[in-house]
Image: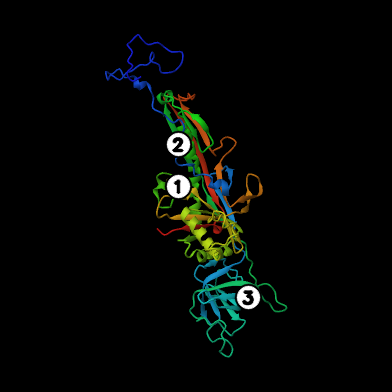
Amino acid sequence: MANVSPNFGSIKPSQLQQTLESNYLNFTDGSGKNFSQQYLPEIYEAEVERYGNRTLSGFLRMVGAEMPMSSDQVVWSEQTRLHIAYTNVSCTNANTLSFATGGTGINFVNNVISIGQTLVVMSPSTGQELKVYVTGTTANGSAGTGGNTNPATVTVKPYTQESLAVGGQAGGTNVIFPVTAVGSGDLKIFVYGSEFKKGTTDANINSITPSFTQYSNSPIIIKERYRISGSDTAQIGWVEVATESGTSGFLWYLKAEAETRLRFEDYLEMSVIEGELVAGGSTLTTTDKLKGTEGLFAAVRTRGNIVNNFSAASGLSDFDSVLKNLDTQGAIEENMLFLNRATSLDFDDMLASLSAGAAGGVAYGLFENSEQMALNLGFSGFRRGSYDFYKTDWKYLNDASTRGGMTNTSIDGILIPAGTSTVYDQQLGTNIRRPFLHVRYRASQADDRKMKTWITGSVGGAYTSDLDAMEVHFLSERCLVTQAANNFVLFTASV
C-alpha cells in the first residue's frame, strides 16, 4: 500500500470502511497539501482526579449543627462553678489570712467568707493543708462581723494546731501545717462547711448570689463570585467529570462554576474555624468598619486548654495531664480528637507502646490483630481513665493548600467534647439542647442568608444588566458559637 499513489479522479469509493487500492489517498509530498490536520489529537474525555476529594468542609457537620438567627449578635451565658476558691492568699500573721488586692481565684466572688465557716488552707508548693475555723473578717482594714464587702482578711483558728505559724501546735511539735506561714503568699483556700454552737443565729452568714459568665459573637458576611464572558459561553467544551458534590457526567463551562461553589462552601467552614475578632487598636475597626468573628481556634486559645508539643515519647504523661485538667472542668465522658497526620501517628505510637508484651511487642487479639492477618497499627478509639476518645485525621490540617504540607505547623489538632448544653432559645421560647459547637446564620422570613446564590448579567438566561457576561454570586452571613470552651483542648506546637 505504501507504493500506491492513485491519480486524481481514479478514486473508487468502497461500500465498506476499509483501506483498498482504489480508495487510498497519499498526501506525503510535502507540498503543503497535508490533510493530517483533520485528525484531532487523542483526547481523554474523563478528567483525572489527581487530588482525590479536594473539599475540606464537613468537620462542623460532624460535630455541630446549623441554626438561624435574626440579630447582629448572638449572646449566651455559661454557668460558673458551684464552689468558690481563693488563690494567692497570704498569711500575714499566726492567725490571719489576707486576700490579694482585687481578689483572685476560681469563681472568685467578694463578700462570701463568713464567721462560722470552715476552710481548707492549702499550700500548692508543698501539698500540705490545714483545716481552720473563721472567727472574724475585716474589710478595708476595719474589723467586721460578717456582711462585709470585699473582705481584706479573715481571722482563723486551726482545728489541729494552735496557729498557722511554724511551731504553732500545742507543745511545739508535730506541726501539721509547717508552712513558713507569716509572709507566705501562695496559699489556696476554699470553704467546705460551717460549724455553730447551740443557740446561735445566722446573722453572720453571708448570702451568695449566683453569677454567670456571658459571651457573644457576631456573624460575618462571606462573598464569592464566578464570571464568564458571553463569547466564552459560545465556545462549548465538554469534559466528563465526577465532582466532590456528587455531580457526574459531561459538563460544559459551568464546571468552573461548580468548583467555585465547592470552594465557597469550604470558605463557610474555614472562616468560622480561623476567624479572629478585630483588636481594639486595629484600623480595621475605625477605617474599614469591620469587627471580625471569634473562630474555633481563637475561642479555645482564649477560654480553653492548650497542650504544647505533644509527642509519642512522652505522650502518656502529656495526655494524662490533659485528663487531669479535664477532671477540673466539665469532665465530658465522650470526646473526639481531630488531628493532623504527625500527631495522629503519635497517638498510635503511644497506644501501641501500651499494648506491648506479646509476639514482638504487639498484643495479638486485643485489637483483633493476629499472626495470620495484616497488622493494623492504627487506633480509631480508646479509653483512658473514665473518658472515651474517638480519633480521626482532620483533612484540613493535612491538605497542602491549607495547614498541611509544612514541616512546622502551629496547630496539630483539637479535642472536642461530644456533648450538648441546655440553652434558652429566644425564637422557640424554651430551653433546648444544642451541641457545644454550632453555627448560627442570619435568616428571616424575608431573606435566608445561610447560602444565597443568584445570577446577574445578560448571558446564560439572566437579563439583569448590559454586562456581556454571566456572573454567579455567592453569599452567606454566619458565625460559630463555641460553648463551654473549657472542655476543648487545642494541640499546638512551638514554631
Marked residue nearer the N-terminal end (1 or 3): 3
In which quadrant of the rendered image does the N terminus lie?
A: top left
- List the residue tagged with mark 3: 118
Where residue 317 appears, x then y in whole percent?
Answer: 51, 66
Q: Position of residue 371 (x, y in %)?
A: 56, 58
Q: Earlier in the sequence, mark 2 or mark 1?
A: 2
Report helix, strand or loop for mark 1: loop
Residue 301 appears in view: no
Left of 13 or right of it: where is 196? right
Q: Quadrant of the C terminus?
A: bottom left
Q: Give the vertical position of 351 relative to 278 (above or below).
A: below
Density class for disc 3 (Cα within 10 Å; few <14, some 14-19, many ≥20) is many
Residue closest to the eye, 35 or 186: 35
Q: Nearer the viewer, mark 2 or mark 1?
A: 2
Residue 5: quarter of image: top left
User: Is label 1 or label 3 in front?
Assistant: 1
Residue tagged 1? 399
Q: Describe the element under mark 3 as helix, strand or loop.
A: strand
Q: Amino acid at mark 2?
A: Val
Q: Give the mark nearer the N terminus: 2 vs 3.
A: 2
> Mark 1 and 3 residues: CB-CB less than 8 Å, in contact?
no
Q: In the rendered structure, which amino acid carries the disc numbered 1?
A: Asp
As measured in the structure, the alpha-carbon distance from the residue carrying label 2 to the one carrying label 1 is 19 Å
Residue that label 2 marks: 48
